[in-house]
C-alpha cells in the first residue's frame, strides 16, 4: 500500500478530541473511559476510517476503537469523524503491542483488508496468524468473535485454517460477500474492489471459552 503523506498530520493528531494520545493509560479501563458498560468493538488496521465511523453512527450502543499505525492514514480518519460522536475513538498503535493497551475487555475484532504478507517467511505477520490470535486471547472479554474481509484469496484460505486450528468455529463464510449478502456498511477498499468486479471474501468466526 502506497501511503500519501498528509502535511499537517501532526497538527490534526495533536488537536483531535478523537485520538487517544496514550492508550496504555486505559488498559483494563476502557469502559470507564467511555463512561458506560456497552460492548467494545475494535478494528485493527482501520485505514481511512470509513468502516468504523459508519458503524459508530449506526450503532450508538456499541463503543468502537479504530487502530492504525500510520500517522498519515489515521490523520485522514480523524478528519472524517462527525462532531458529537461519543462512542468512537482512534488509536495510533502497532498491533504487535496490542496487549499493552487492552486487557480482557474487547467483545469483537474486525480485520478488514489487512496486509496479506504474501511471502511465506512473513506469514506469521498476518493479523490472522497464531501469533496474533494468541495476543487476542488476552484482550477478549468472554466469547471471542472475529470478522474478516479481504480481496486476497490466499490470505483468506490461510485465515480459515488458522482460525480453525486455534479453536474458532467458522460461523459464516462467503466467497463473494456482495453477491451473497450485500453489507450495509463497507470499507473504502471494499467499495473499490467490488466496483472492479473482484470478489470480497468474508468470515465471521467465534470461540466460546465456556465449552
Image (tube, grey):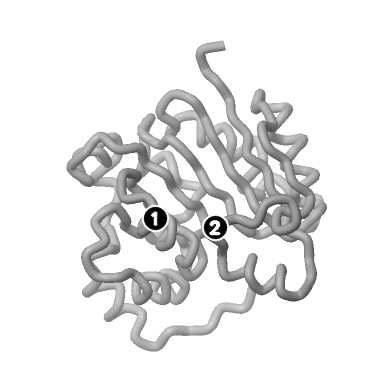
Is residue 117 visible in the rendered image? The answer is no
Can you tell which quarter of the image residue 37 is in?
A: top left
Quadrant where the N terminus sits is: bottom right
Q: Position of residue 197 (x, y in %)?
A: 79, 70
Query: Are the residues tagged 2 and 1 within 8 Å (C-beta)?
Result: yes
Real-space Cα distance between discs 2 and 1? 10 Å
- Looking at the image, which is closer to me, 145 or 19? 145
Q: In this view, which residue lies farthest toward the bottom?
A: 7
Which residue is rendered at x = 72% and y = 35% of the image?
A: 162
Q: Earlier in the sequence, mark 2 or mark 1?
A: 1
Q: Residues within 10 Å of mark 1 (few under 14, many from 20)?
A: few
**Label 1 SS:** helix
Which residue is rendered at x = 48% and y = 84% of the image?
A: 5
Q: Which residue is mark 2?
A: 184
Can you tell which quarter of the image residue 129 is in?
A: top right
Quadrant where the C terminus sits is: top right
Query: On the rendered structure, is 2 left or right of 161?
Result: left
Which residue is rendered at x = 22% and y = 74% of the image?
A: 15
Q: Which residue is mark 1?
A: 58
- Looking at the image, which is closer to me, 54 or 182? 182
Compared to residue 138, the image places residue 61 above or below, namely below
Q: Position of residue 45 (x, y in %)?
A: 52, 58
Q: Position of residue 67 (x, y in %)?
A: 44, 56
Amino acid at each position: 500500500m502506497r501511503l500519501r503523506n498528509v502535511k499537517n498530520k501532526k497538527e490534526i493528531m495533536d488537536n483531535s478530541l478523537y485520538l487517544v494520545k496514550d492508550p496504555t493509560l486505559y488498559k483494563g479501563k476502557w469502559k470507564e473511559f467511555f463512561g458506560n458498560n456497552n460492548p467494545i468493538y475494535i478494528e485493527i488496521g482501520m485505514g481511512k476510517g470509513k468502516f468504523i465511523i459508519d458503524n459508530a453512527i449506526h450503532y450508538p450502543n456499541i463503543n468502537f476503537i479504530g487502530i492504525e499505525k500510520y500517522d498519515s492514514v489515521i490523520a485522514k480518519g480523524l478528519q472524517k469523524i462527525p462532531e458529537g460522536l461519543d462512542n468512537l475513538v482512534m488509536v495510533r498503535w502497532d498491533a504487535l503491542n496490542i496487549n499493552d493497551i487492552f486487557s480482557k475487555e474487547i467483545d469483537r475484532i474486525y480485520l478488514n483488508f489487512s496486509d496479506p504478507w504474501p511471502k511465506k517467511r512473513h506469514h506469521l505477520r498476518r493479523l490472522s496468524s497464531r501469533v496474533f490470535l494468541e495476543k487476542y486471547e488476552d484482550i477478549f472479554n468472554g466469547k471471542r468473535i472475529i470478522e474478516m474481509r479481504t480481496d486476497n484469496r490466499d490470505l483468506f484460505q490461510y485465515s480459515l485454517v488458522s482460525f480453525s486450528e486455534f479453536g474458532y468455529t467458522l460461523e459464516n463464510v462467503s466467497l463473494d460477500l456482495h453477491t451473497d449478502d450485500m453489507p450495509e456498511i463497507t470499507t473504502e477498499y471494499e467499495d473499490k474492489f467490488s466496483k472492479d468486479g473482484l470478489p470480497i471474501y468474508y468470515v465471521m468466526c467465534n470461540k466460546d471459552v465456556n465449552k
